[in-house]
Amino acid sequence: MANYAIIVDLETTGLDSGRDQIIEIGAIKVDLDTGEVIDQFQTLTKPDDVYGFFDDEDEDIEDSDVEPDRLDPFIVELTGITDEMLEGAPSNPEAVEAFFQFAGDLQIWAYNAGFDSKFLNNHTEEHRPLKDVLALARRAFPELENHKLSTVAQQLNVSVEGAHRAIADCLITKEVLLRGIKYQIENPHPFHHGFKASDYLPKEEGIFFGKIIVFTGALVTMTRDGAATHASQFGFKIGSSVTKKTNYLVVGIQDLTTLAGHDKSTKQRKAEELIAEGVKIEILTENDFIKMCGIAT
C-alpha cells in the first residue's frame, strides 16, 4: 500500500489571516517511503475584489474613489511575485478548491501548519486537518537555536535555493519531513514515531464531532498517523490516553515485548476496567474502525 502524502505551502500578502490573502499555493504529492515526488500543483491566486488592477488607460480610474491595493514591496522582494503576475489569476476560493481536489483524501503536511490552515480555511468548508512538520522538527531536533524552515534545512545540509516560492518551499519541507521521520524511527523514545494526538484537530462538521477516540497497538492497513487523520476528518478528537471521557478505543496488534508480561496494552486494560464500572466505552478492532468511518483501503 503506497505511503503517499501532500506537502503544501502558501505565499501570502502578509501574516494576518483575518486581513491578508493568498497569492500562491504550491503542493507536491510525495511517496514518504522513497522520497519521490509523484505529482505537483501550483497556482498564483489573485486576492479578492478589494485588490484591484487598473490599466493605465482606464478612463474610470481618475473618477474612482477606490485606491487599488498593491503588494507590499517587501513581499515582492521576498517572493518575486508582482502585481502583474497576479492579474487574471484565479480567486482565493477557486485556488483553494483546486488545491483540495489535488490533495484528495491524502494526509496534508505543512511547515507551521497553523499558518497555512488559517488561510485555507478562510475559503473552504473542508477544514481539513494539516499535519505540522514544524512540530515534528521541534521534537526531532530540540537542540537548534530556532526552528525556522531555513534554520532546520541548514542544519540538515538541505539547499534553500528558491525559498519563498511555494513549490521550492514544499521541496525543502519534504527533505525536513523525511529526515525528521527517519530520525524518530531510529530514535523512537520518547516519541511514538512522530505521533502526537494534539496535532490532529477534529473537523467540526464531522458526524462524530464531540466524540473522543484513542488508538493502541499497530494497525495493518494504515499508520497510526493515517488513522488519526481519517478520524479527525470525521470529527473525532484524538485522545492520548483512556479516560472516562473516551468513547472509542481502537485496538491494533500489540508488541508483546512492551507489555511487561500482560497480554493487553495499558490503554485496553484501563478501558476494560472503566467498562466494568459502567463507563460507556466501545472497544473496536481495526476493521470495525474502517467500517465505521467508511475508509477505502
Image (cartoon, grey):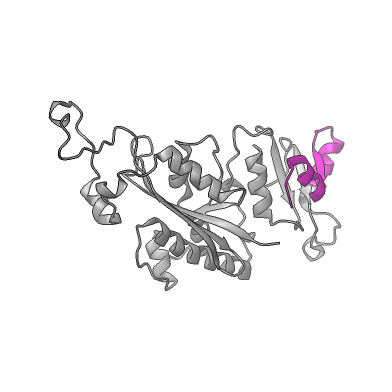
Instruction: Specify whether residue 145 is in view.
Output: no
Q: Tell which of 146 and 253 is nearer to you.
A: 253
Which region of the structure is painted magenta? 269-297
The question of residue 200 being in magenta is answered with: no
Q: Is residue 272 left or right of residue 53?
A: right
Q: Is residue 256 left or right of residue 4?
A: right
Quadrant showing the N terminus: bottom right
Say which residue appears at 23% left-offset and 41% top-offset.
Answer: 70
Q: Residue furthest left?
A: 62
The question of residue 295 being in magenta is answered with: yes
Q: Quadrant of residue 61?
A: top left
Q: Residue furthest bottom?
A: 157
Please state the horizontal and vertical placement of residue 257, each as a whole percent of the image.
79, 66
Q: Is residue 268 left or right of residue 86?
A: right
Q: Quadrant of residue 5?
A: bottom right
How many marks overall? 0
Say which residue appears at 23% left-offset and 37% top-offset.
Answer: 69
Q: Quadrant of residue 233?
A: top right
As drawn, 290 above or below 172: above
Say which residue appears at 60% left-offset and 39% top-offset.
Answer: 202
As drawn, 210 above or below 142: above
Please state the horizontal and vertical placement of residue 52, each as a whole percent of the image.
26, 36
Please state the horizontal and vertical placement of residue 105, each as a whole percent of the image.
62, 48
Instruction: Specify whether residue 289 is in view.
Output: yes
Say which residue appears at 64% left-offset and 54% top-offset.
Answer: 225
As drawn, 230 above or below 162: above
